[in-house]
Amino acid sequence: MPWASKPWRREKPRAEIRAFRPTGRYHSLFSTVQGLFMIARKLSLPITLGLALALVACDRPESAGPGFQDAAPGMAVITVNGTAISAPVFESFAMAQGLSPATAENTEARQKLAKQLTDLELLAQDATRQKLDKDPELASSLLAQYYTTLAGAAVQHYTKDHPLSEEKIKAAYEEWAKDLPTTEYHARHILVKDEATAQSILDQLATGGDFAKLAAEFSMDPSKGTGGDLGWFTPDQMVEPFAKAVMALKAGETAQTPVQTDFGWHVVRLEETRPVAVPKLEESRDAVTNHANNKLVEDYLAELRKQAKIKTDEKIINGDKPADQKT
């Protein structure tokens, strides 16, 4: 189950039902922005340059080699069947592996890297010889990598040209902090497949049944080994129906009706609560900076969308086949 740690929480939760739920006004573009930042941070990795070696320009003759070679001019470090791998390309690979600049200590590793690059070029050339680059599925895959790599570069370039001032970081902290939960909950649960079983467990609890023993007997969750104990958590670390049920309880109470989530049916008991201190700016600067950069990139994307002409075929997106392809 997807889960993301918060600055004030270091221990990874054990419960399967925990889920990261981005909150606040930036939720709609959260995934896009986060994905672009991930790409931007990894631009120097070998896969990016492997793509550059493998993606062949459609308007070039087969003997000319990959279409990105001319974008990185420089002295040829390696030449394979007349196609040069330039010094900037080699050093980009080397930098990604901590092998740039050259030193007496990394000479052997750089020699090994040169062999790896040679192998990449040989494989790319042979793929072109076999016209694998003309295969629609492969071409689509390469183009998808091309798009995401360029998008990551755009984000990296934009954030570099629009650095965050301390004032902006402080303002972002205030906005970020106001959405943070102020209470932690300690709860137990028993997860079962159907409502009838959950109701039966509630009936047993009502007549004096022991919650921990019932959890050990019936629960499908790994927490059954600790009597259904989920430890401490904040509501945003749980799926919404479960979080709402917990927050509606007082310490020591058990929800009177089973709680349904995508994972099944839960019998929920709240053990106790405690206040959560909002972290200071210096304790959460990385998270706040990410929050501010997310907003910066969201505004950037919004402006690009405003200026663009975008047409979307909803039928294809929804998986509808054209009439001439239907059986």
Image (tube, grey):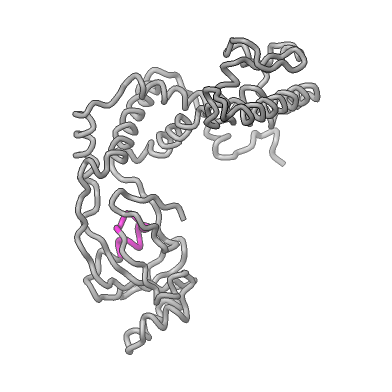
Above or below, comparing residue 261 to residue 292 in the picture? below
Name the foreground residue: 109 vs 288: 109
Could you tell whether 122 is left or right of 45 in the image?
right
Residue 279 position, x and y percent, is 22, 48
x and y percent of residue 139 in the render?
67, 27
Residue found at x 20% / y 50%: 278
Judge left or right: residue 282 versus residue 29.
left
Q: Position of residue 286 (x, y in %)?
A: 31, 39
Is residue 248 found inside the magenta-colored segment of the image?
A: no
Question: In the figure, is residue 189 to the left or right of 111?
Answer: left
> Up-down: is 61 above or below 27?
above
**Quadrant hosting residue 172:** top left
Instruction: Tell whether position 238 is magenta.
Output: yes
Majority secondary structure of magenta residues: helix
Which residue is outermost to the right? 130
Q: Residue furthest bottom?
A: 207
Residue positioned 78% across, 25% down in the render: 126
Q: In which image quadrant can residue 142 be found?
A: top right
Residue at 38% across, 51% down: 20
Q: Which residues are magenta?
A: 234-245
Query: Which residue is drawn at the image coordinates 22% and 72% (left, top)?
Result: 251
Quarter of the figure with the C terminus: top right
Toward the viewer: 131 or 163?
Answer: 163
Image position of 185 with respect to 4: above or below: below
Where does residue 189 sit, x and y in percent of width and height?
A: 38, 72
In this figure, what is the number of numbered marks?
Answer: 0
